[in-house]
Image (spheres, helix red, strand yellow):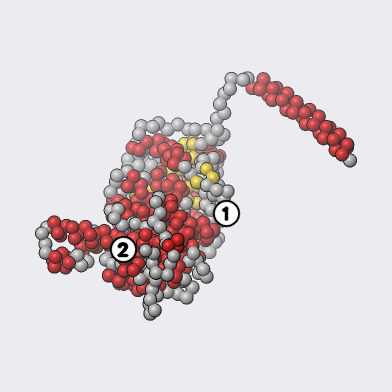
Amino acid sequence: MPPRGRTKSDTPTAPSTMKELKDTLWKAADKLRGSMDASQYKDVILGLVFLKYVSDAFSERRAALQEELAADGLSADQIEQLTDDVDEYTGHGVFWIPATSRWEYLAQRAKGDDTTSIGQLIDGAMEHIEASNPALRATLPKIFNKDNVDQRRLGELIDLFNSARFSGLGAGRARDLLGEVYEYFLEKFAAAEGKRGGEFYTPASVVRVLVEVLEPTKGRMYDPCCGSGGMFVQAEKFLEAHDRDRTGISVYGQENNERTWRMAKMNLAIHGLNADLGPVWGDTFARDLHTDLESRGGADYVLANPPFNIKDWARNESDPRWKYGVPPANNANYAWIQHIISKLAKDGSAGVVMANGSMSTNSGGEGQIRANLVEADLVSCLVALPTQLFRSTGIPVCVWFFAKDKTAGKHGSIDRSGQVLFIDARNLGFMVDRAERSLADTDIGQIAGTFHAWRGSASAEGAVYEDVPGFAYSSTLAEIKAADYVLTPGRYVGAAAVADDGEPIEEKVARLQTELFAAFDESERLAAVVREQLGRVG
């Protein structure tokens, strides 16, 4: 029977595929938009996804614990007592969820009653979860009972989430499915918000380029402008795909926007990542929350997509991070680069998404900073990416890869000291729609595979690097200096090789010239025919 007050045709049904699930939840969530601004709407929806996740994970652990205790022959009273032991949950990486915060409790009351709305119940649930889990304090949204939140539609959305069976799949699979939903919603919100969406979301294919090139497997990983945590999530997926221990990576990040910082903490919790994002949000330049990272030996990997070309930033000329030159006041690009380098371990490596102008600009001393970075042999690889990868901006982008140590060792068997790899990937990718391009798995594999062959990485599987005209070129520092330290890949890789069809060049030119003149003659003949016909009509 459908719930009271709703016809059978209005009752949500459980989608049968992951795509259907994502689309159904998004359409249902979109009904809540109403008079809410985009950022509040985003908090409401992502907060519900998070609440569903932590409650399902808690229920999974509770059921497993009861089975374990029953198998040990404990009495019903003992089982009941031990299933309420908080340590039995937190010790397994599961948040403790108070009884009135659990999804089944809220789902039963999705319609609210005469005295309490469903929004009040959800706000209370968020408060109780934060109070019970110190790691989540100041993280969860408590905005579900505001006047501009349609309580009827909120209840319907909870019904729909309830019908979509995430639980009963095993803790790992349930986490994966809700993690996918969370990421899908982030992508949809970013697309809907346009330029502002780029503040918290980096396209997955761009992140994968960084992850597949750097191959973070163990150690400390850092992102000074982590957005919603996409770099960390893709690193976790990389570890899973290669059957590596997810706990091998320690995650450190910082985010300047309060709402985005909260999103990141929820996103990482859903993916089971225990990340240190600092006690609060904050400006990386004004207040570095991870000054102790260097004392721990530095970051083994840094992956970042800093905001491009910031003109108003907390600049301090005496900052010790500006080892290679003081960045100009009207552009923070080289401030981000130098901050990232300052965080690297002695054999650490980094991948940084930047606007294309960073590879060639000479404004405000940036050319000299770039020259100093090259001469310090810190630049490992430059990749020019295709246009339209970012729906939020039309600015062409590239990826800088840095390495503190290019000798044979941790990152590869080939000593690449004094060399830089240039990759021109501007012709790769496919159009998702009229406004956005994406990189296919084969494109990402081509970029990463070229780098690993050049570096002699274990993942290269014995592949031997060779320059590919129009795509890849291994340059010496002397060549870069001769080019006045301009690092645009197209300048080095040259034009793509043209297949030899066996026709002598002189004969080909003569043939093409004859064909062109014939085309001109035919064009003139057709023009005369058209004029004659128009004259008859007149």
Residue 143: name its quadrant: bottom left
Pick whichever, 366 or 75, lies toward us: 75
Image coords of residue 113 (percent x, y): 38, 76
Q: Is residue 78 left or right of residue 269?
A: left
Which type of secondary structure does the marked residue at label 1 adopt? Answer: helix
Amino acid type, callout 1: Ser
Report crowding for label 2: few under 14, some 14 to 19, many 20 or more residues within 10 A (C-alpha).
many
Which type of secondary structure does the marked residue at label 2 adopt? Answer: helix
Where does label 2 land, which residue?
A: 55
Pick whichever, 487 or 131, lies toward us: 131
The C terminus, quarter of image: top right
Where does label 1 land, which residue?
A: 363
Which sits earlier in the primary sequence, circle 1 or circle 2?
Answer: 2
Name the residue rendered at 39%, 56% in the picture. Answer: 14
Pick whichever, 507 or 73, lies toward us: 73
Report crowding for label 1: few under 14, some 14 to 19, many 20 or more residues within 10 A (C-alpha).
few
Residue 133's disc is: none
Amino acid type, callout 2: Ser
Name the residue rendered at 23%, 59% in the picture. Answer: 63
Residue 410: name its quadrant: top left
Image coords of residue 199 (percent x, y): 49, 59
Is residue 307 positioned above or below 85 on the image?
A: above
